[in-house]
Image: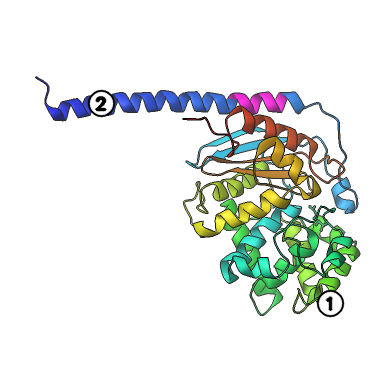
């Protein structure tokens, strides 16, 4: 007769084998979804590079890379995942997370707010409507304000903290793309106006010029698709970087970060995006989009041509297809 011990050993082996087979099937499904989405949108010619920041108009519109990283740290890539573009508005997520970590989630809710504006990302009308409140840290006004809320005495101290925080999310040293920074710094009069309005309404407490400059610098940080996917996967994994193992953001704050991404991550098209995918996400005018399937994976696509709302056309299509193909929508549940 078989001993209990050998039964349980046999069961364990059988269980491991089933697990392995399921894992291989998952792996094949993810790879297949990346390959299919890459091929489907490779030749799509819709959209146009952002050009209100002159350096962005010069970026090769054919750069196209997809990266997906699971909460177990498994990396799937397709296309160009080494070319860096400027992170732009995707940076807003991580500065917002830093403020949450330092001052608590209510600091953001009670200052610029956590609501959708329904307006374009650099809207001045949206500021005027509620005197700098009832908006969020993912549109320019709220984002420059969030940057002003990062604690520190000097420019260098604040900037060092922000860049260090992005590094921990990405799991590698990141640097500023100087040409993009200089180009935006020379043409960011509208953001300077936005910062001064937020200062006038008491949302930025001091140094609006410094806050705008640090914000411009954070938007110019260079990232490739893989960096962005690691950053997204860190949010998918409760704030712990699944590649480096470093805890970057308190798990209790991750849901609040994801809530603002779901509300406002794709600006005034956030509702359409959520309807299509259910995924908290964030776009940048450099052409990147990150999206988070909580507890499952982070995904990022870079492709510079944007639609009218300022969101990458190929990135939206590829992420939606891939996530929907592998069950990424957190609202989709199979009944028991
Ligand atoms: N740096 C850009 C700006 O302030 C970021 C905008 C974006 O990516 N939507 O206009």
Q: Residue at x 76, y 53 (%)?
A: 88
The image's colour scheme reads rainbow
The disc placed on residue 65 is none
Q: Place residue 63 in its image quadrant.
A: top right
The local secondary structure at tag 1 comes to: helix
**Quadrant containing the N terminus in the rendered view:** top left
What is the magenta range? 32-39
On the image, the x and y values in percent for residue 219 come to: 75, 57
Callout 2 secondary element = helix
Answer above or below: position of 10 versus 136.
Answer: above
Q: Quadrant of residue 160?
A: bottom right
The label shown at residue 11 is 2
Q: How far apart in space, not on screen, are marks 1 and 2 (Cα)? A: 68 Å
Question: How many numbered discs sit on the rendered protein?
Answer: 2
SS majority, magenta: helix
Residue 198 placed where, x, y %?
A: 81, 71
Is there CB contact under 8 Å for labels 1 and 2?
Answer: no
In the rendered image, the residue lying farthest to the left is 1
How packed is label 1: few (under 14 Cα within 10 Å), some, or many (20 or more)?
A: some
The residue indicated by pointer 1 is 200
């Amino acid at each position: 007769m078989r001993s209990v011990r050998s039964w349980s050993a046999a069961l364990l082996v059988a269980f491991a084998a089933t697990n392995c087979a399921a894992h291989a099937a998952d792996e094949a499904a993810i790879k297949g979804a990346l390959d299919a989405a890459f091929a489907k949108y490779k030749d799509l010619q819709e959209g146009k590079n952002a050009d209100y920041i002159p350096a962005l108009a010069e970026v090769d519109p054919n750069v196209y890379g997809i990266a997906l990283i699971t909460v177990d740290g498994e990396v799937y890539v397709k296309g160009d995942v080494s070319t860096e573009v400027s992170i732009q508005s995707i940076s807003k997520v991580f500065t917002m997370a830093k403020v949450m970590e330092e001052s608590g989630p209510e600091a953001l809710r009670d200052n610029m707010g956590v609501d959708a504006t329904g307006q374009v990302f650099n809207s001045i009308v949206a500021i005027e409507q509620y005197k700098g409140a009832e908006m969020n840290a993912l549109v320019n006004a709220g984002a420059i304000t969030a940057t002003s809320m990062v604690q520190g005495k000097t420019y260098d101290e604040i900037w060092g903290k922000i860049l260090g925080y992005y590094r921990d999310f990405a799991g590698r040293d990141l640097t500023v793309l100087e040409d993009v920074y200089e180009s935006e710094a020379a043409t960011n009069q509208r953001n300077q106006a936005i910062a001064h309005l937020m200062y006038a309404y008491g949302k930025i407490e001091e140094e609006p010029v410094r806050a705008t400059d640090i914000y411009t610098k954070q938007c110019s940080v260079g990232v490739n698709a893989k960096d962005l996917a690691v950053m997204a996967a860190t949010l998918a994994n409760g704030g712990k970087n699944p590649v480096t193992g470093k805890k970057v953001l308190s798990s209790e704050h991750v849901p609040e970060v994801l809530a603002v991404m779901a509300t406002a991550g794709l600006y005034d098209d956030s509702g359409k995006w959520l309807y299509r995918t259910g995924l908290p996400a964030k776009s940048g005018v450099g052409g990147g989009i990150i999206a988070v399937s909580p507890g499952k994976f982070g995904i990022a696509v870079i492709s510079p041509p944007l639609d009218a709302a300022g969101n990458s056309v190929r990135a939206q299509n590829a992420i939606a297809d891939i996530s929907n193909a592998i069950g990424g929508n957190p609202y989709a549940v199979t009944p028991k």
